[in-house]
Image: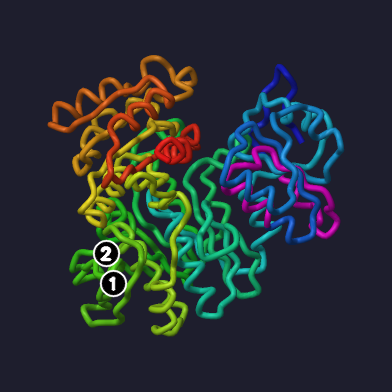
Amino acid sequence: MDLVNNNTVISAELSPDLNVVPSKLKHIHMMGICGTGMASLAGILKQRGYVVTGSDENVYPPMSLFLERLSIPILKGYRAENIDSFPDLVIVGNVITRFNPEAVRLSQLQIPYLSLPQALRELAMKDQRSIVVSGTHGKTTTTAIASWLLEHSGMEPGFMIGGIPVNFEGSFKLGKGKFFVIEGDEYDTAFFDKVPKFLHYAPWVAILTSIEFDHADIYRDLDHVTESFQRLIELIPSDGLLIANHDDPVVREEVGKAKCPVITYGLDNEAVWQGVDIAIKDGLTRVRVLKHDNEYIRISTPLFGRHNISNLLSVIALSDFLGVDRQAASDATRSFRGIRRRQEIKGEKAGVLVMDDFAHHPTAVEKTIQAVKDRYADHRLVAVFEPRSNSSRRNIFQERYSRSFDCADLVLIPEPPMMENVPKGERFSSHALVRALQARGLTALYFPDTDHLLRGLLRNARSGDLVLIMSNGSFDNLHERLLKELE
């Protein structure tokens, strides 16, 4: 096994030690354990009876608390001595670089190692049929809905979700049934395994929600992203199924090339599965679901926003393919309670409602703001956005973000963090975004950091506001700090 030393580069070829017999493993160490996927896999491995340890330098809720409840120790910071206990296997998260001190030590000790998707496939889901939920947007929510619907209908699925669903105690379950529902990410697997994660999951059924350009740190353009999804589609067997969002023009184009069976869903009238007569009543979104233009089911859900109704349609199509009873499907959609960090109400103080959301791609920001404005039409909507992801800190979406906040009444944007990691010519400008928003007639404010932004929020917030805070990170615990100051 060729890894690294301080001056050499790890081989791009992984020689995965799948010769390792799972039953002979005792201690597994996970590098980058606080990532949502890594933490979920840690829980699965703990349930399987392994001794699990991990290390990370970004230790914050909810995943830190999640691991704490599982009694999985987290070593803070990456150090060579963290693996001097000679674990039987090391799982390397995709945040780990080839020069990470633990990666260097790993090569010196010649300990077997795997990427997260490889370990998941070999140690968690090998004996089950995989249902892979993929797409640029909506993966986490759709995976959670699918997992809940199958659970509610008695199928006892295994699952791993890139977030924490409220209906379950955690983001994973081994499951005793035939199916494993997995969130299929198009991001690359690890520094030694540069293929999309979802290519490791051997899909029997795949849901494809959307294809847009994202992950500008690893993809060149939309065509490059699309190539990865093409490879996923090619993996689906003839007895499987591709469930595709007909509303997405790129998805619509790509599924025409599929060799497996395809069924479409969407809000337009050309999809096989359609959602019509969408209305909000008594805090629930009500939808009439059609299959081939005939009414199939009527559902009510606490979710709101057209994007979430689209996500629900894909799962209704899945449930029909798997033979789930319609009433069970209806009951599951009504009882689904959402995902933490997806339009999650964090609290209300002094008449100010504070909501947390994971949105970071400009399309996700736009759809989230629009959905929240539709649902809380009687509130002034204050949108707070942290450009934190690898793509949002780059200027590739500079102009696109300027069209993402139109439904907000007030917008607050801080300086992005970790800009030193982005080449100067590629850096996103919060100043420029605020100026562009102001030019569109929006009230938008710039702040140099989170502390100044918090003070700006406190100056501008008033009773009746809904403060929507969007970030794919902890945002310096802005939600709790705001609620505390309002109190």
Depicted 50 relative to depicted 145: above or below: above
Residue 93 in view of the camera = yes
Determine which residue is flagged by label 2. Answer: 266
* Label placed on residue 273: 1
Residue 320 in view of the camera = no
Spot occupied by residue 403 in the image (x, y as percentages of width and height): 21, 37
Q: Earlier in the sequence, mark 2 or mark 1?
A: 2
* Label placed on residue 129: none
Q: Is residue 274 left or right of residue 417?
A: left
Please report the residue visible at 68 percent of the width from the left and 28 percent of the height from the top.
10
Depicted 190 relative to depicted 353: above or below: above
- Amino acid type indicated by mark 1: Trp
Q: Is residue 128 left or right of residue 72?
A: left
Q: Residues within 10 Å of mark 2 (few under 14, many from 20)?
A: many
Viewer-closest of 338 and 24: 338
The quarter of the picture where the C terminus appears is top left
Q: Secondary structure at mark 2?
A: strand
Please report the residue visible at 81 percent of the width from the left and 39 percent of the height from the top.
111
Which quadrant would residue 285 be assigned to in this image? bottom left
Viewer-closest of 33 and 233: 33
The answer to the question of whether label 2 and label 1 lie on touching residues, with beta carbons closer than 8 A, is yes
Q: Residue furthest top?
A: 424
Spot occupied by residue 466 in the image (x, y as percentages of width and height): 30, 46
Residue 27 on the magenta segment: yes
Viewer-closest of 360 and 86: 360
Spot occupied by residue 297 in the image (x, y as percentages of width and height): 31, 81
Q: Secondary structure at mark 1?
A: strand
Q: From which residue to which does the magenta span run?
A: 16-43
Viewer-closest of 331 and 466: 466
- Amino acid type indicated by mark 2: Gly
